[in-house]
């Protein structure tokens, strides 16, 4: 019985020697390490549908894409002013919805545009009701 104990202690000591010895070195798997360029390419892709915004690809039915790649016409005035808004990559990825940064060159803000869009939607709804009543 004493021999078994010595044997297991010897095995344990060899194992510790192997672990702490100079011959031991951690192995780094190159496929697990991303380069800065690979990280940049991944951030410029939609996390939801996988298209590459950097290559001007978008998915029209994806809320994270929002119908545009890295730039879009001014969101406040629907592009009338000619300004280009840039995608907020971190917010788009975090929320799963397209987020943009920019300013309207005509001084519109998004709340004004939202009110305008609501008025247009209400007018269209009213017209559709009149059409369906006449049909």
Image (spheres, grey):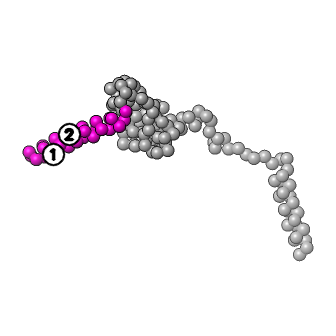
Position of residue 77 measured from the top left corner of the image (x, y, whole percent): 33, 30
Tag 1, which secondary structure?
A: helix
Taking 6 as reference, is 72 above or below it?
above
Which region is colored magenta?
109-135
Position of residue 76 measured from the top left corner of the image (x, y, whole percent): 36, 32
* Residue ID at (89%, 75%): 1
Classify 10 Å Cα crowding around label 2: few (below 14), some (14-19), many (20 and above).
few
Asked whether the beta carbons under mark 2 and mark 1 sit within 8 Å of each other, the answer is: no
Q: Is residue 111 left or right of residue 55?
A: left
> Residue 123: which numbered mark, if any?
2
Q: Is residue 41 left or right of residue 34?
A: left
Q: Can residue 90 be seen from the camera position used here?
A: yes
Q: Is residue 97 magenta?
A: no
Tag 2, which secondary structure?
A: helix
Give the quarter of the image for residue 10.
Answer: bottom right
Taking 17 as reference, is 122 above or below it?
above
Sequence-wise first label, 2 or 1:
2
Q: Nearer the viewer, residue 34 or 95?
A: 95
Task: Give the residue at mark 1.
Answer: 129
Q: Is residue 44 left or right of residue 68?
A: right
């Amino acid at each position: 019985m004493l021999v078994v104990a010595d044997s297991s202690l010897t095995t344990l000591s060899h194992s510790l020697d192997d672990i702490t010895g100079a011959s031991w070195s951690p192995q780094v798997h190159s496929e697990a390490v991303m380069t800065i360029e690979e990280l940049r390419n991944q951030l410029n892709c939609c996390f939801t549908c996988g298209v590459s915004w950097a290559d001007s690809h978008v998915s029209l039915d994806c809320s994270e894409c929002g119908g545009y790649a890295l730039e879009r016409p001014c969101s406040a005035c629907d592009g009338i002013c000619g300004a280009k808004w840039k995608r907020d990559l971190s917010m788009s990825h975090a929320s799963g919805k397209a987020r943009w940064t920019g300013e309207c060159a005509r001084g519109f803000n998004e709340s004004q545009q939202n009110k305008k869009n609501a008025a247009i939607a209400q007018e269209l709804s009213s017209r559709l009701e009149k059409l369906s009543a006449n049909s």
